Amino acid sequence: MKKKRLSKKGMSVIIGYVLLITFGIIMGGIVYTYLKTYVPSEIDKCPDGVSIFLKDFTCVNNQLNLTIKNNGKFNLQGYFIHATNNSNQTIATINLAKYFDASLSENGLSNNALIYFNTNSHENFAPGDIRYNVFNNTPSGIYSIELIPARFQKIGSTERFVSCGSAKISEVLTCS
Amino acid sequence: MNKKRGLSPVVATVLLISIVIIIGLIVFFWFRGITHEAITKFDGTNVKLVCGEVSFQADYTNGELLVSNDGNVPIYRLKAKIEGAGSYTTVTVGESDSSWPSVGLNQGEAYNGALGDAQGATKILLIPVLIGQTNSEGKKSYTCDESQGKEIVVS
């Protein structure tokens, strides 16, 4: 009986394809892993329309009383406050959040870096709201203050705390 | 009489595959050496892109450097390139300085400190240094490009 011979010529072609596709997938994976870091993600940024306004102030005997209004279109959760102690200082670097007096203030708490209005992110400083805040035992000779509003901003699926540097305000004070 | 006619196909295939694997490994290690591992920050964004989001104000008066971080990217350190008459030096602001927070200058924070070696300086270029994450080395600092720095002209 004549034996039927099995041709193996087709096999090497299949191995060639398998190798080629595997190599392509591996190379694609390497390039994807490297390049995906260069895809810009949504940046932490405050929307235009965030605004804070220093309605009134008094500063006597190292006590600074501020009346602040949210005159923007968005809720705020707090603000950073820094001061200068002379007219030549162009950037306020004295952190006044450390001197915040929660007992004398109408609203607000301090974590020594910023003043925030509530621990619950959904209860906040709404547009049109006015807050009265007191800073006690502040350094003497305060010349001016700078306020940077801050808020929780939804970025993608997460809520992040962002400072709104573009909405920073400066005010020269006359302290006695 | 010797009947061997060259290498058997099995040996040839094994040799071929071995050579390909060895050459592949050599190319891989060479390529890995010339490309730096990406440093990422926040949710996997390359730190080079994050450098573009850094926003800070700075000034130099009476021997003191004033910095305010107005953006949302923490500034780990600042490289200060101090240009004088015919020379320049580079110092790192925030190293061995108790006024500078150890974790960096976070959003909304400000710094006020003496800048050594700046006597007689005509220009100071402040370049942000950020902390990012790598897979192999964990946390790693990255100095942004000079174009992303802030120049202070000393009068």
Image (spheres, rainbow, N blue to C red):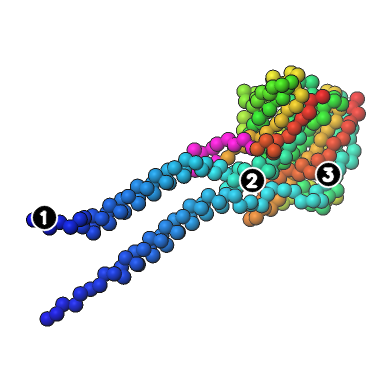
- Looking at the picture, how far across and down is residue A53, in whole percent? 86, 43
In the image, is B133 to the left or to the right of B21?
Answer: right
User: What residue do we see at 31% from left, 54% from top?
Assistant: B17
The quadrant of the rendering that contains the C terminus of chain A is: top right
Q: Residue A96: horizontal and vertical position, in percent?
A: 77, 31
**What secondary structure predominates along the stretch shown in magenta?**
strand
x and y percentages locating residue A156 in the rendered image: 65, 55
According to the picture, the residue beneath numbered tag 3 turns out to be A52
Q: Amino acid at mark 3?
A: Ile
**Residue linked to disc 2:** B49
Q: Of the two numbered discs 1 and 2 on the same chain, state the one appearing first in sequence.
A: 1
Instruction: Give the residue at mark 1.
Output: B2
* Rendered residue at 56%/52% (across/down): A36
Q: Is residue B139 magenta?
A: yes
Q: Amino acid at mark 1?
A: Asn
Camera-side residue of A134 and A15: A15
Q: CA distance from mark 3 to mark 1?
A: 97 Å
Q: Nearer the viewer, residue A127 or A171?
A: A171
Q: Secondary structure at mark 2?
A: helix
For residue B56, side relative to residue A10 (left or right)? right
User: From the viewer's perspective, is A74 left or right of A41?
Assistant: right
> Is the residue marked by circle 1 packed among few (<14), some (14-19), or many (20+) residues within 10 Å?
few
Chain of the residue where label 2 is placed in the rendered structure: B
- Residue B149 seen: yes
User: Which stretch appears magenta?
Assistant: B133-144
Which dot, 3 or 2, sits closer to the camera?
2
Asked whether residue A45 is drawn in magenta, I would say no
Q: Secondary structure at mark 3?
A: strand
Residue pictured at 60% horizontal, 47% vertical: B45
- Alpha-carbon neighbours of circle 2 within 10 Å: few (<14), some, or many (≥20)? some
Residue A150: quadrant of the picture: top right
